[in-house]
Amino acid sequence: MRGGLLDGMRVLDFGQWRPAPYATQLLADLGAEVLKVEPPDGDPMRVFPEIFATVASHKRSVVLDLKDPDGLARALELVAEADVVVEGWRPGVAARLGVGPDDVRAVNPSVVYCSLSGFGAVGPLSHVTGHDVNYQARAASLSPDGGAPAPSPSPRVPWADLAGGLGAAFAICAAWIGRARTGEGETVDVSMTDLLATCTVGGGVLEGIGRPVHGLPGYGTFEVADGYVALGVITEPHFWAATCRVLGLDDAVELDVSEQIERSDELRARIAVALSTQSRDDVVERLVAAGAPASPVVSRAEIVVDDHFRARATLHDTPLGPAFGHPIRFVDHPSLEPTRPPEPGAHQDTGFSAR
C-alpha cells in the first residue's frame, strides 16, 4: 500500500552506492514513487545486501545501459514522466551519459533536478574523486583538534553520505513545493563536504573563557568494567554536580566551567578512574537517576532490541530481520515500514506505475 505526505511525487533515481539512494529512500518512506535506474551489472551496493536493503525499500527497478542509444532513449522517456530526477555521479558524468540537467530539461522543463556529489558541481575540488572518509577529512570532521587522539583509521558512521542524503531529500522537498506553487523546476547542487563543513566549523570559544575550548572533562566516552559509557556535561552546573556526586568527586561539585577547563586533564583522569571499576548499565542507571547526561555505548546487536526505538516505530521486524525505517516520526501521516528491495529490473516493462 502506498500513501503518505509525498504521495504523487515521482522520482527517477540514477543514484548508486549510498548517498543519493539514501536521499530517495527518505522520499520513498513518505510515499514518493521512486524508480531506481540500475546499470547492467546492478547497483554496486547490492554486494552489501544489508546496507542495500536500507536504501532500496519501496522502490521500483529498471536496468538501463545509458551508453546504449536504446537505453538512453528509454531513460529520457522515464524522465518525461518524472517530477524529480536524482543523480550521484561526479560532476560532468551525467551530461556525458546524456542525462545531465540540460538533457533532462529538454524533455521535462519543470523537473526538479538534484545532483549529489562529494564536493559539489562547482569549485576547485568539484572533479576530485572520493568517498565518505575523504569528504569527512576535507570538512574537518576527522581533525584531532586540541591534542585529541588521532582519528579512527575507518570512521564507523558514514556521516558525509548520510548528511548528503538528508540534505538532498530536504532540498528536493523544498524545490517540489516551489514547483507546485509556481510551475517552475529547480536544479539542486548538493555537496556532502559542504553539509559537514557547516556543522564542524565555527564556535569553540566560550563566553568568559576567551580561548578555544577542547577537552571538557565531563564530555566524552569513558571505559568501564564491562564496556564504555558516554557523559555529556558541557557548561551546565547541575549536570556537572550530579555527575560528580554519583562518582564520588564531592570536592569538585562546585567548580565552575572555567575551573573545570583549567583542571581538565586532572578531572578527566579522576572521572576515568571512578568509572573504570563500574558496571556499565548500573552506573548509567545511577547517573541518569541523579539527572546526569549519561548513556551506555551500545553495540549494533543491542540497538536492534532496544524498546525505545520500537516504541517510536523507528525499528521494525522485516523478512530480512530487524530494520530501521524513516528516521522522522510523522504522527498523522506515518512513514512506510521497510520492505524487501526489488530485484534488478523487476519493473523493466512498467517503469513508473500508472497515475
Image (tube, rainbow, N blue to C red):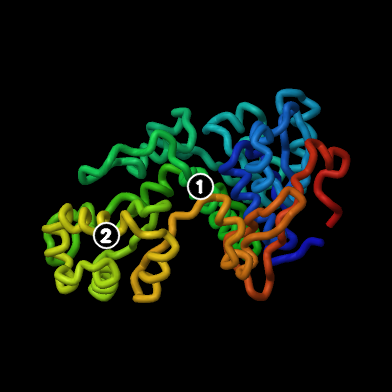
**Amino acid marked by disc 2:** Ala
Residue at horizontal 68%, vertical 39%? 49
**Side of 216 relative to 101 (left or right):** left
Q: Is residue 209 left or right of residue 186?
A: left
Q: Extreme front residue here?
A: 277
Circle 1 is placed at which residue position? 164
Is 319 rendered above or below residue 129? below
Does the image show residue 333?
yes
Q: Vertically, is 183 above or below 124?
A: below
From the image, tell me which residue sits under label 2: 274
Residue at 27% across / 66% down in the picture?
A: 247
User: Judging from the image, what secondary structure is the residue with disc 2 in?
Assistant: helix
Camera-side residue of 176 and 149: 149
Return the x and y of residue 27 as percentages of the image width and height: 65, 56
Residue 144 coordinates in the image, percent (x, y) = 28, 41
Helix, strand, or loop for circle 1? helix
